[in-house]
Image (cartoon, helix red, strand yellow):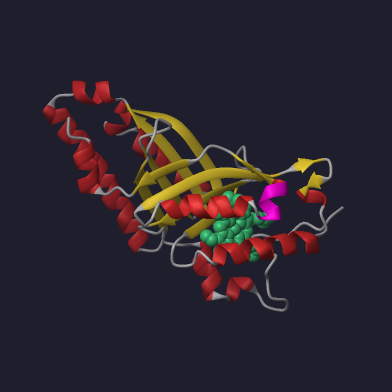
Amino acid sequence: MSEAVATLDGWYCLHDFRAIDWNAWKSLSAGERARAEDELYGLLRKYQNVENAKQGSTAFFSIVGQKADFVFMHLRETLDELNELETEFNKTMFAGVTVPTYSFVSVVELGGYMAKPGTDPMEDPEILARLKPALPKSKHICFYPMNKKREGSDNWYTLPAEERRNYLRAHGMIGRSYAGKIKQIITGSIGLDDWEWGVTLFADDALQFKKIVHEMRFDEGSARFGEFGDFYVGNLLDESKMAAMLQP
Ligand code: VOV
């Protein structure tokens, strides 16, 4: 049996994708729409307060294309809190005109492959900050789930740990060349959802998503072992942008 890597795990994560039922939204009266928006913006402010108190973080982005209209990416200490957030939103009037399209449950993860021997990573403030991060307010988001292949000789999980470490070192070198252009949050979902990881990228220039994913496809670790789900890409939302989007 190959040696399993010890992961470092941080905040739990829920990606909650919704579509807006535009006919239902337009059929509400002006008063009902105003109440629904007030309730939504009240929640956004509540999420911001949680982030200010460093008890979690929430990213709110529109989604381009037909897979969804917007996403909440929530990070919280416990799965219970994520459940409460979901239910709280579902009870709002605004949620009544949305349709859930996809969700992904995971936990912020750092692999132990690059761990420095003899040190306790949980004592390192830089690592703790990466496990419980404030989500970037970049202009764009890109999310996709992925697996590492388990087929015949291309089985990530039967590779010796040293070989996996070498692949990830090469992967990290490519990643580092995007410093300042892309921030990545890797969340682990083995045992939590239908894929093994969620990859969430943030950038001010959306073209950098295409560039990094393209470049990584040629890296042997991704070329041999990477399997990818649907891609979601979108733009940063706030109260005023959402209000403009919801203008009937
Ligand atoms: C934006 C840049 C960027 C950077 C700097 C970066 C660096 C690193 C390092 C150093 C490490 C190893 C962690 C450890 O062990 O300490 C990882 C780990 C990982 N990555 Fe990554 N990654 C990036 C970006 C980045 C992207 C764009 C993708 C998607 C891959 C693609 O083909 O589309 C990805 C995936 C992952 C995954 C799924 C893991 C976990 C693998 C495992 O088996 O555990 N990642 N990643």
Please, what is the dominant secondary structure of the magenta stretch? helix
Q: Nearer the viewer, residue 80 or 154?
A: 154
Q: Residue at x 23, y 45 (%)?
A: 241
The answer to whether residue 222 is magenta is yes
Asked if residue 9 is positioned above or below residue 229 in the image, the reply reads below
Picture quadrant where residue 62 is located = top left
The answer to whether residue 106 is magenta is no
Residue 33 image position (x, y, % from top left): 18, 31
Q: Residue at x 24, y 42 (%)?
A: 242
- Name the quarter where the C terminus is drawn: top left
- Residue furthest out toward the right: 1
Picture quadrant where residue 245 is located = top left
Asked if residue 195 is positioned above or below residue 114 in the image, the reply reads above
Residue 78 image position (x, y, % from top left): 51, 51
Q: Is residue 236 visible?
A: yes
| 44 sits left or right of 193 in the view | left
| 150 sits left or right of 74 in the view | right
In magenta, the rendered stretch is 219-224
| 179 sits left or right of 206 in the view | right
Residue 228 image position (x, y, % from top left): 60, 41
Residue 144 image position (x, y, % from top left): 53, 44
Q: Quadrant of ligand 1?
A: bottom right
